[in-house]
């Protein structure tokens, strides 16, 4: 087994290679003057099971193309099997048809990657696990929430409240609660499918005087966290923190979140940024080393 260090996740790939004791395959890459992508594997993958580590956060399209090209190059150069490790799976939020005329974008991406040579896929806290079942190859999602929660425990947080900003994220808040040992609850969130705008309401949440960590899978525009922070302030929370797996932080999201009264934002290196305080390497290395069942 060898590990290909995709251009979007070189640092994470190096860490995984070290922890899983796998030989890294470095990649030469560039963009041609006309905008086309180029990749080349710098060492042999012949007769190997190849793991390609490549996240697909922005710029999503070029990173997906690099991933597809790396899979194709691996197979052309004799790889026996290609597993894609895609910490942040772009397009996963369009997992079904919401409005007439749309497609299920994540399914389209999976078929494209399969045609390129990918045989199976590992991702982290995918938006909807159900979507993975429709992929043309086996795909699994890991949860980084225990690792993110441990970050807070190591900083001395105890029995703090884990809040999900919507019902869908309640499984995340519950996983966090198991590590943090405090209370757990969720807000109600509604999204207008045409404008993308969301509204949230808090219901019977007793967080007065408490430290609350809002846990979500993704922080993108920050709207969800900012809305939650506003409600928490109204409910008398003492301190508010924001934690996620995928810190996309589009535009000025980070500043807007901090301006809304959130003390700190914590994310992982699924999307490398300066809030990526938790590395996914141990989680991914463990799954790569785990004996295959069956
Ligand atoms: C949506 O349901 C997700 O779990 C996140 O809550 C959402 O993607 C966050 O987006 P934003 O930061 O733009 O509110």
Image (tube, rainbow, N blue to C red):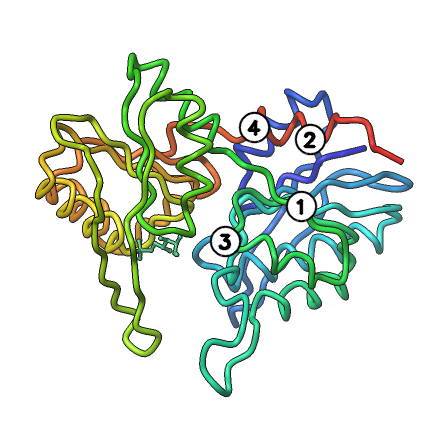
Residue 64 in percent (x, y) is at 58, 59
**Quadrant of the picture in which ligand 1 is shown:** bottom left
Proximity of marks 4 and 3: CB atoms separated by less than 8 Å: no
Measuring 69% from the left and 67% from the top, which residue is drawn there? 112
Of the image marks 2 and 1, the number of the one nearer the N terminus:
1
Residue 33 in percent (x, y) is at 51, 67
Residue 220 has which mark?
A: none
Q: Is mark 3 on a helix, strand or loop?
A: loop
Q: How far apart are marks 3 and 2 (CA)?
A: 20 Å
Q: How far apart are marks 4 and 3 (CA)?
A: 20 Å
Q: Name the residue under label 1.
A: 140
Q: Mark 4 points at which residue?
A: 281
Which is in the foreground here, disc 3 or disc 2? 3
Q: Name the residue under label 3.
A: 127
Proximity of marks 1 and 4: CB atoms separated by less than 8 Å: no
Q: Is mark 1 on a helix, strand or loop?
A: strand
Q: Name the residue under label 2.
A: 287
Q: In this view, does 198 lie above or below 129?
A: below
Q: How far apart are marks 3 and 1 (CA)?
A: 12 Å
């Amino acid at each position: 087994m060898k590990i290909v260090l995709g251009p979007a996740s070189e640092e994470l790939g190096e860490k995984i290679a070290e922890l899983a004791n796998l030989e890294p395959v470095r990649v030469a890459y560039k963009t041609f003057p006309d905008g086309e992508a180029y990749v080349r594997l710098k060492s042999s993958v012949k007769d190997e099971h190849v793991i390609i580590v490549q996240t697909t956060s922005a710029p999503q399209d070029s990173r997906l193309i690099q991933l597809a090209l790396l899979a194709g190059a691996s197979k052309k150069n004799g790889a026996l099997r290609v597993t894609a490790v895609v910490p942040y799976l772009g397009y996963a939020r369009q997992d079904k048809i919401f409005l007439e005329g749309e497609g299920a974008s994540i399914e389209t991406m999976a078929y494209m990657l399969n045609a390129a040579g990918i045989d199976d896929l590992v991702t982290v806290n995918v938006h909807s696990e159900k979507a993975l079942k429709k992929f043309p190859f086996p795909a699994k999602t890991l949860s980084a929430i225990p690792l993110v929660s441990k970050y807070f425990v190591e900083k001395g947080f105890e029995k703090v409240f884990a809040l999900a900003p919507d019902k869908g994220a309640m499984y995340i808040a519950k996983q966090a609660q198991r590590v943090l040992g405090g209370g757990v609850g969720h807000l109600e969130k509604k999204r207008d499918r045409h404008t993308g705008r969301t509204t949230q309401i808090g219901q019977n949440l007793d967080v007065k005087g408490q430290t609350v960590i809002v846990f979500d899978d993704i922080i993108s525009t920050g709207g969800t966290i900012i809305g939650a922070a506003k409600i928490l302030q109204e409910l008398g929370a003492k301190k508010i923190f924001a934690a996620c797996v995928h810190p996309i932080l589009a535009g000025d999201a980070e500043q807007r979140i901090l301006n809304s009264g959130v003390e700190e934002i914590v994310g992982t290196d699924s999307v490398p940024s300066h809030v990526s305080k938790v590395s996914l390497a141990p989680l991914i290395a463990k799954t790569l080393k785990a004996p295959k069942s069956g």
